[in-house]
Image (cartoon, rainbow, N blue to C red):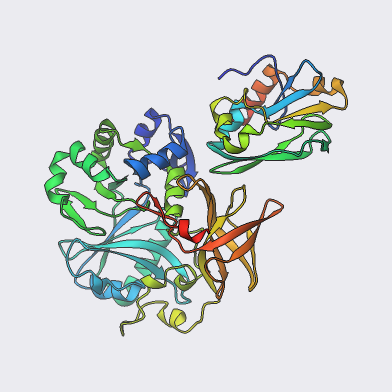
Amino acid sequence: MSIPADLKYTDTHEWVRKEADGSVSVGITHHAQDLLGDLVYVENPQVGRKFKKGEECGVVESVKAASDIYAPLSGEILAINEALADAPEKINESAYDAWMFRLRPDDAGELETLLDASGYGELVESESD
Amino acid sequence: MLRRTPLYEAHLKLKAKLVDFGGWEMPLHYGSQIEEHHSVRRDAGMFDVSHMLAIDIQGDQSRPYLLGLLANNVERLAEPGEALYSCMLNEQGGVIDDLIVYRMASGTYRLVVNAGTAEKDLEWLALQRDRSAPDVDIVARRDLSMIAVQGPNARTKLWRAEPGTESASHQIPPFCATTCGDWLIARTGYTGEDGFEVTLPSADATGLWDALLAQGVAPAGLGARDTLRLEAGMNLYGQDMDETVTPMESGLAWTVDLASSRNFIGKQAVAGSVPGRKLMGLVLRERGVLRAHQKVQTPLGDGETTSGTFSPTLGLSIALARLPVGVDYGEDVRVAVRGRDLSARTVKYPFVRHGKSLIDDQLD
């Protein structure tokens, strides 16, 4: 599966999409869901909470294992994808459509510190060695 | 270098995700662990279990040897073809391994032991042989492979795949086995469903695998095997029990024969102690997933989960937990799950048998 060129990525396997209103949507990558296997539980952050970049802000759990979700940027949670509570398998089915939460970055410039698609591709490559 | 079973190429062809399991390169799943789980509960699935070891015990002294070695009583195997589940204990009553012993037609007994403990078991078997029954032969059958075909339609699909097996295996009752040429067909399993475990020469393994595939039997990996066995309330060696606990603390008192006058290794220790803990089922009452080694708070003290997972059949999280004796079924306890303190209910397990929930009336 190709890595979408219009998104940004973290080295902890979150993807980040810049929205028109200046907020960002966050999910986990196709590679991440593939490593985890069938997802059965998503714990999203509370709307209104603020996180620092790299802070734990949620959990996804598969039948096999649990994995923390980290805030890709510092900012405030604006919304969460409620549909995932009852249908976490949406992440397996289409990782880049199944956003987990929206965040308003404290500093829009911080987005540029994240990996682009080719950088993330190299990361995935190096981790699979 | 990881060991591979004779079905390794077949797993690659099916695009299995392979993992290191006790030194063996085994399929974790072939795409979706949950779909594989449902196939076994609703239709038929198959597992490569060739990493497990069959050990033949041969010679006149075989029976007295096993009587002294196993916590369950091989005298219960009245006829060739019968099978028995047993623990093998050390002197302290700790579980060295759990296994199935089959009585074979020739007066031979066959043990099927776990992959991760096979070498340790062989050493223990040889040590006890040298002490008590020097004429017994212990033959590790690495020349054999094993395929478990499990599910409500598993038997019918085996008969369609290999029509020659039907007459031999049509009548065998649960927990019994029959030979069919040089195959052993046993009505046993690790899923809580009907089905067979077929032990056969490794040269035949891929042929049977492909024939079952052609009948629509779903290949299933270790992931589904784990959720199926946990729903069925079956212990996993090394996780729910090991050498530090007795069968009495592991929900396996029913497999320990203390009634007969027979002596066996570990009997004194097990008979002379009062267990302070017991294995119980847990059902999580909130969103989340129980895992192994989570702390469980009860009014009588703390315990710990030994296995935990999301149950695909029930759609919620279940666990086995070792809890203080005296904790009742139907009690609410607290489990520490990733920094949260969640509510769980103690239940009698198995959780699921033959595709049906057994815990519905325990959750009200």
**Residue B74 position within the rendered picture, expressed as x and y whole percent measured from the top left:** 27, 71
In depth, the one of B29 and B343 nearer the eye is B343
**Residue A55 position within the rendered picture, expressed as x and y whole percent measured from the top left:** 79, 38
Residue displayed at 58% across by 17% down: A2
Q: Which residue, as the protein is rendered here, is positioned at the far front? A: B364
In this picture, residue B104 sits left or right of residue B293: left
Q: Is residue B107 above or below residue B19?
A: below
**Residue A80 position within the rendered picture, expressed as x and y whole percent measured from the top left:** 71, 32
In this picture, residue B322 sits left or right of residue B68: right
Residue displayed at 66% across by 22% down: A122
Q: Is residue B323 above or below residue B30?
A: below
Is residue B6 in sight in this rendering? yes
Q: Which residue, as the protein is rendered here, is positioned at the far right? A: A107
Residue B79 found in image quarter: bottom left
In depth, the one of A91 and B257 nearer the eye is A91
**Residue A41 position within the rendered picture, expressed as x and y whole percent measured from the top left:** 60, 41
In depth, the one of B3 and B293 nearer the eye is B293
Residue A61 found in image quarter: top right
Is residue A129 in sight in this rendering? no
